[in-house]
């Protein structure tokens, strides 16, 4: 029975329905907030229910999935509306619905202008992100991939900080530059497949079996990789990220760091490597090198940051470097680690962005130099900040440790040097995070103006936002096995593609 | 064979309606704007309905006008363009006291010319249609007599049009001299000995130049921004869409016929260069524009570039792609210029990018429509522009013009910047002054909603249009 109802479509498009509701009642801000909250909660419960319903793997016409949908859409072009859910995408849509609920709560007080439009774009974005995680038709995937840029553009542009126009235009130009080349490669792959098998299709399952010449494969893979690398972001094409993150409103930063970057890594894992195995193998050294450079570079740059939000943004580049290494090595351990690390990064970095947002609401600045002495002034806030900072630097017992450890230990057999450099990079991460914790929480601020300013500790609403995140961080840190079990099946399938 | 006059009912209706509007204007001292508009609108709708509903037995009318699928497709599209332009112009014309009879009548006659161009099977009919279309447009562009910009634009378009016509006439004469045929299909068919003779090639080049002027192909595009900026916004909407769709459909027909010759292969590189130049110049020049109408003018040049690129693929899938994209292009540009028309201030159209700042919070619906049109022009989902561009690039890649497709994509990336420049102004930058714009009237509202729905519908469910194009294609171009 569970298989006949279009659950995936419902999960994807429920937020879209909510978004239009928010738009039409734009004149009543409280109504918009509550409607969006209820809709996103409903979606979260739907996904949670999928978790508990013990789905079994089935063979569908589009591959093996826990749940799948497949309908003809634009038949004359061989485009189908096909969705597939496996353990990896299940975990990622869980993260998506979870973070969206938090985003709405975070924006409750922060967003006071154009509330209806804000929630419209937020929920619209949720729909498009979940579409990326579930699509198994390359055209459908591309459609969602491109659509997600538009609401993000408006979220940064309308509700962002001072330099928002620059940041949002840079964001859109970078991401579109990558994805339009991917469109060409995508079409090329589709035509080559069509010419060889006379079956014109965008089905991932079919296209994986396309025989390609080496140089063609390299070109096509290059175009895909560029698009994914910009989104992830991998070192030389990451420059849009600090600007976009810093200028976005808190909810925007959370979605950007927690989810949008994940779409890039997920696409590399689900589409990039399986579609072009030979070229992907060829690119492994490059990806490893860039991942490591990202790790070191982020740590180095982060040390010099004056803006706390920018610092957290750079830490994303470092963490995603680990994910890239995990994907590039491509064995069972590193893939599980990389996927887990995607979830982990989504949780901790979002939490840090939320905390910075709360600071900004109180102190009205993001300058590290203006912060200090929070341990005395706001003990509750400081506890949470310390906790998530520790998670971010990879303290054993918290979530990031598990993911990083799996990736680096899994790497040691084939690329020992990468492991050693990776651990060295993590030490640098520890240094910059401890420095910033020291400066903000414990030390007194050097700026006289802010020293005597009284600050309110976190409210119940804020605890409600942070506590679930903290629990998730603890859960994955102490007992990651249930999550890793979810990844086992899909990772096995993915490994099979590169044999 | 007895000619069946009902077969060309759309043409008769448009001609009759145009003259009726002219005559009615004479009976009243003060022009009955409402009545004239109603007659014009009814004519356009009736012509469109006739194009869809009548299914002629024959494929051509006296070997002059094609009335099978291809012709009827463009007849319908062009009447749709005429109808939407009429809807956008009602309030504009009324508020500014432009004589209703000449405006509506000329719009209908111009539409008639466009249909003749799109469905001509005879060089003379083609020329006749082109002149009908151009002459009406010369007047329409300059219809705001007190305004020097409008007059200048009209004069400029007239000069350029006259030169283009001269090229065309001479080209047609050369083709006739080389082949001895005035029938388009026969003169371009592979059976003719002279198909690659110097006279023929000269003639075809001249025709290409003439059409190139009209579709603003680089390097014959220089008039475009000035004319688009000077013309009243509803006329710009009509000019940018109708005249380009009509001439491009004619160009596509000629290319399709001529591509059956092996000579075509030797001249593909000419189109390669022209297409690349048109895309590059259009998109790159648009970057520097600070006036919205000029920006959209360069954008429309670039759009023609994408279509020219696809003309290279005319042998494989290109025809379908171009027909689809022309329909999408018409909707997007009509929406964009039409919105500008409704936003116009009393004496001047809203034009400077600064005037658009913060407009989204004063006129949310119009801004939303403009945004959707711009997003569609930029080729992003979920709009029709995305599917259209995908089909274009698919056709180009299928014909193995990979380098051109890659260069095309680079220009598309460039174009994202200036399309979003307008969106940034609308939504993000704070308003500096508040433009005094009239409320949206019923007719413009209908047109706006129709365009919005069509762009999103074609973007998400293009199957219906694609399959109907696929269905009519095999019948219509293979005559003779």
Image: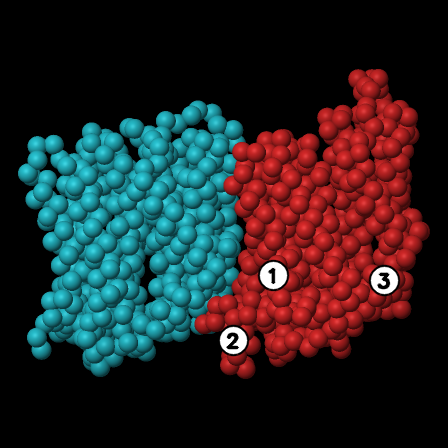
The residue singled out by tag 1 in the image is A9
Label 1 vs label 2: CA separation? 24 Å
Q: How is the image coloured?
A: by chain
Q: Measuring 77% from the left and 35% from the top, which residue is drawn there?
A: A461
Question: Is there a contact, CB below 8 Å, between mark 3 and mark 1?
Answer: no
The residue singled out by tag 3 in the image is A482
Task: Give the drawing colour for chain A.
Answer: red
Helix, strand or loop at mark 1: helix
Above or below, B280 relative to A387: below
Q: Measuring 37% from the left and 72% from the top, which residue is drawn there?
A: B470
The residue singled out by tag 2 in the image is A200
Return the chain for callout 3. Answer: A
* Number of the front mark, 1 or 2: 1
**Residue B303 position by quadrant:** bottom left
Of label 3 and label 1, which has the lower sequence position? 1
Q: Is residue A288 visible?
A: no
Q: Measuring 14% from the left and 49% from the top, which residue is drawn there?
A: B18
Label 3 vs label 1: CA separation? 26 Å
Q: The chain coloured cyan carries which letter?
A: B
For this rendering, which residue is in front, B99 or A14? A14
For this rendering, which residue is in front, B104 or A450? B104
* Number of the front mark, 3 or 2: 3
Instruction: Give residue A299's position: percent from left, percent from top.
Output: 82, 45
Question: In this rendering, would A2 be left or right of A19?
Answer: right
Q: Residues within 10 Å of mark 2 (few under 14, many from 20)?
A: many
Helix, strand or loop at mark 2: loop
Instruction: Give residue A98's position: percent from left, percent from top.
Output: 73, 49
Question: In this rendering, would B109 be left or right of A132?
Answer: left
Image quadrant holding the N terminus of chain A, namely bottom right
């Amino acid at each position: 029975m569970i298989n006949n109802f279009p659950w995936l479509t419902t999960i994807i498009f429920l937020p879209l329905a909510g978004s239009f509701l928010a738009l039409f009642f734009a004149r009543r801000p409280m109504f918009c907030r509550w409607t969006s909250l209820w809709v996103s909660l409903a979606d979260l419960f739907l996904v949670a229910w999928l978790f508990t319903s013990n789905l079994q793997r089935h063979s569908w016409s589009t591959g093996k999935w826990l749940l799948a949908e497949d309908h003809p859409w634009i038949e004359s072009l061989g485009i189908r509306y096909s969705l597939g859910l496996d353990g990896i995408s299940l975990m990622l849509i869980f993260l998506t619905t979870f973070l969206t609920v938090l985003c709405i709560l975070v924006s409750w007080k922060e967003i006071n202008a154009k509330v209806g439009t804000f929630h419209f774009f937020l929920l619209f974005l949720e729909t498009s992100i979940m579409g990326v995680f579930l699509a198994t038709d390359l055209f459908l995937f591309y459609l969602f991939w491109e659509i997600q840029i538009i609401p993000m553009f408006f979220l940064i542009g309308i509700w962002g900080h001072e330099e928002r126009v620059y940041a949002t235009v840079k964001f859109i130009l970078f991401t579109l530059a990558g994805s339009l080349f991917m469109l060409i490669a995508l079409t090329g792959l589709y035509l080559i497949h069509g010419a060889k098998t006379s079956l014109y299709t965008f089905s991932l399952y079919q296209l994986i079996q396309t025989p390609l010449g080496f140089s063609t494969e390299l070109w096509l893979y290059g175009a895909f990789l560029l698009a994914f690398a910009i989104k992830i972001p991998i070192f030389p094409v990451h420059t849009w990220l600090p600007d976009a993150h810093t200028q976005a409103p808190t909810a925007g930063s959370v979605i950007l760091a927690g989810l949008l970057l994940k779409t890039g890594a997920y696409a590399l894992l689900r589409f990039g490597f399986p579609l072009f195995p030979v070229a992907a193998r060829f690119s492994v050294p490059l990806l490893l090198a860039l991942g490591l450079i990202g790790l070191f570079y982020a740590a180095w740059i982060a040390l010099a940051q004056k803006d706390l939000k920018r610092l957290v943004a750079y830490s994303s580049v470092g963490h995603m470097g680990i994910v890239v290494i995990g994907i590039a090595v491509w064995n069972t351990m590193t893939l599980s680690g990389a996927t887990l690390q995607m979830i982990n990064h989504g949780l901790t970095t979002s939490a840090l962005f939320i905390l910075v947002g709360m600071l900004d609401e109180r102190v009205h600045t993001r300058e590290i130099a203006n912060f200090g002495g929070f341990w005395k002034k706001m003990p509750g806030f400081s506890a949470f900040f310390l906790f998530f900072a520790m998670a971010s630097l990879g303290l054993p017992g918290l979530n990031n440790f598990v993911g990083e450890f799996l990736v680096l230990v899994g790497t040691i057999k084939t690329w020992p040097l990468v492991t050693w450099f990776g651990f060295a990079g993590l030490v640098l991460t520890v240094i910059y995070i401890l420095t910033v914790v020291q400066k903000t929480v414990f030390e007194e601020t050097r700026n006289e103006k802010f020293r005597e300013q009284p600050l309110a500790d976190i409210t119940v609403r804020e605890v409600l936002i942070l506590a679930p995140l903290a629990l998730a961080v603890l859960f994955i840190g102490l007992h990651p096995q249930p999550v890793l079990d979810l990844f086992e099946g899909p990772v096995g399938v993915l490994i099979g593609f590169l044999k | 064979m007895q000619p069946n006059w009902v077969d060309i009912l759309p043409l008769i209706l448009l001609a009759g309606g145009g003259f009726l509007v002219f005559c009615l204007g004479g009976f009243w001292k003060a022009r009955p704007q409402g009545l004239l508009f109603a007659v014009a609108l009814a004519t356009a709708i009736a012509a469109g309905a006739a194009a869809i509903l009548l299914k002629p037995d024959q494929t051509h009318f006296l070997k002059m006008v094609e009335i099978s699928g291809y012709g009827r497709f463009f007849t319908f599209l062009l009447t749709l363009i005429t109808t939407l332009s009429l809807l956008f112009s009602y309030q504009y014309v009324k508020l500014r006291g432009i004589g209703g009879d000449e405006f509506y009548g000329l719009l209908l006659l111009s539409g008639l010319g466009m249909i003749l161009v799109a469905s001509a099977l005879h060089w003379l009919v083609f020329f006749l249609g082109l002149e009908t279309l151009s002459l009406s447009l010369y007047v329409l562009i300059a219809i705001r007599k007190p305004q020097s910009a409008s007059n200048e634009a009209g004069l400029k378009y007239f000069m350029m049009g006259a030169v283009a016509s001269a090229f065309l006439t001479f080209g047609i004469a050369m083709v006739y001299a080389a082949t001895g045929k005035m029938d388009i299909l026969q003169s371009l068919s592979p059976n003719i000995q002279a198909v690659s003779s110097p006279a023929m090639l000269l003639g075809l080049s001249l025709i290409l130049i003439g059409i190139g002027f009209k579709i603003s192909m680089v390097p014959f595009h220089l008039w475009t921004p000035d004319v688009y900026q000077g013309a009243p916004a509803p006329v710009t909407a009509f000019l940018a869409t109708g005249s380009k769709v009509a001439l491009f459909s004619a160009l596509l027909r000629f290319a399709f016929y001529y591509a059956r010759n092996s000579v075509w292969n030797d001249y593909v590189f000419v189109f390669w260069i022209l297409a690349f130049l048109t895309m590059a110049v259009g998109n790159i020049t648009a970057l520097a524009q600070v006036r919205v109408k000029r920006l959209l003018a360069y954008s429309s040049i670039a759009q023609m570039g994408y279509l020219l690129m696809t003309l290279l693929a005319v042998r494989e899938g290109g025809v379908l792609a171009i027909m689809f994209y022309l329909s999408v292009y018409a909707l997007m540009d009509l929406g964009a210029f039409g919105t500008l028309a409704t936003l116009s201030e009393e004496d001047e159209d809203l034009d400077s990018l600064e005037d658009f700042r913060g407009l989204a919070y004063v006129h949310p619906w119009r801004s939303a429509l403009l945004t959707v049109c711009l997003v569609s022009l930029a080729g992003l989902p979920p709009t029709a522009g995305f599917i259209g561009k995908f089909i274009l690039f698919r056709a180009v890649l299928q014909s193995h013009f990979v380098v051109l497709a890659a260069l095309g994509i680079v220009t598309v990336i460039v174009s994202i910047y200036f399309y979003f420049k307008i969106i940034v102004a609308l939504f993000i930058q704070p308003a500096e002054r508040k433009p005094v714009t009239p409320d949206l009237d019923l007719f413009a509202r209908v047109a706006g909603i129709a365009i919005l729905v069509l762009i999103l519908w074609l973007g998400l469910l293009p199957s219906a249009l694609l399959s109907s194009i696929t269905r009519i294609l095999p019948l219509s171009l293979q005559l003779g």
